[in-house]
Image: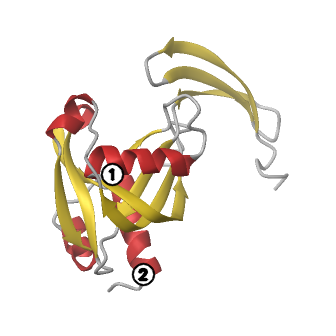
């Protein structure tokens, strides 16, 4: 392998569409042998997510909200986009999202994982945190999905069963909850 890209090179993007959140592009690339090729690419904002852990050390707060792209209600960890001007630090954004979605401030944040949820399609990357030392504050919801979301508690011990029965299907949520279980030694 030649460096981090193994000899592959990104030659540039031809923008197909610029939308509110994403840019759709035709990416041009070169293989190690010099062969050029194209791939459809979605350029997206960074995402943060938190696993808010209650003081018992095994119960977490999740949100149930409607997700238009899949036309379904999803049970997820609190999450959001790094879309506020000047919020370049993922920890600042995840703190804002905890207040907005579950009405909690965290005394401690610990990075559990950095994830590319669909690297064959998008450059979106997610920072997943464990949030502990939670203090209740007024919820500050924004937008129609958040206004109708509910907060649910779940034991980390129940996560494998909730994955198996299809209750949990969101990738960032699965990774965050499984990483938290491993980090905390919950079985």
Q: Position of residue 96 (x, y in %)?
A: 42, 45
- Local secondary structure at mark 2: helix
68 in relation to 60, above or below: above
Q: Which residue is mark 2?
A: 184
Element at label 1: loop
- Residue 40 picture location, percent across and down: 54, 27
> Could you say where residue 56 lies in the image, as x and y percent from the top left?
28, 81
Using the image as rendered, state which of residue 138 and residue 100 is in the foreground.
138
Residue 40 falls left or right of residue 52:
right
The answer to which quarter of the image holds residue 69 is top left
Q: Is residue 186 left or right of residue 67?
A: right
Residue projecting furthest to the right: 2
Report which quarter residue 67 is drawn in: top left
Q: CA distance from mark 2 to mark 1?
A: 19 Å
- Identify the image quadrant of the N terminus: bottom right
Q: Is residue 71 visible?
A: no
For residue 121, side relative to residue 74 (left or right)? right
Tell me which residue sits at (33%, 63%) in the image: 135
In the picture shown, does residue 64 fall above or below 108? above
Which of these two is toward me, 25 or 133? 133
Q: Residue at x 26, y 62 (%)?
A: 61
Residue position marked by numbered label 1 in the rendering: 78
Judge from the rendering whether residue 119 lies leftward or rightward of residue 78; answer left or right.
Answer: right
**If you read the primary sequence from the N terminus, does the residue marked by circle 2 or circle 1 appear first?**
1
């Amino acid at each position: 392998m030649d460096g981090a890209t193994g000899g592959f090179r990104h030659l540039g993007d031809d923008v197909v569409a610029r939308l509110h959140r994403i840019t759709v592009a035709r990416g041009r690339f070169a293989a190690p042998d010099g062969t050029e090729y194209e791939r459809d690419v979605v350029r997206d904002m960074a995402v943060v997510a938190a696993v808010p852990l209650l003081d018992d050390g095994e119960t977490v707060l999740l949100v149930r909200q409607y997700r238009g792209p899949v036309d379904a209600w999803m049970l997820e960890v609190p999450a959001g986009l790094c879309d506020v001007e000047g919020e370049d630090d993922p920890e600042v954004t995840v703190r804002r999202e905890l207040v907005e979605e579950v009405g909690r401030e965290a005394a401690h944040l610990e990075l559990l994982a950095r994830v590319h949820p669909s690297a064959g399609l998008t450059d979106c990357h997610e920072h997943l945190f464990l949030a502990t030392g939670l203090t209740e504050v007024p919820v500050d919801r924004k937008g129609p999905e958040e206004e109708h979301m509910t907060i649910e508690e779940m034991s980390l011990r129940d996560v494998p069963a909730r994955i198996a029965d299809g209750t949990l299907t969101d990738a960032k949520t699965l990774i965050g909850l499984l990483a938290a279980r491993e980090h905390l030694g919950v079985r």
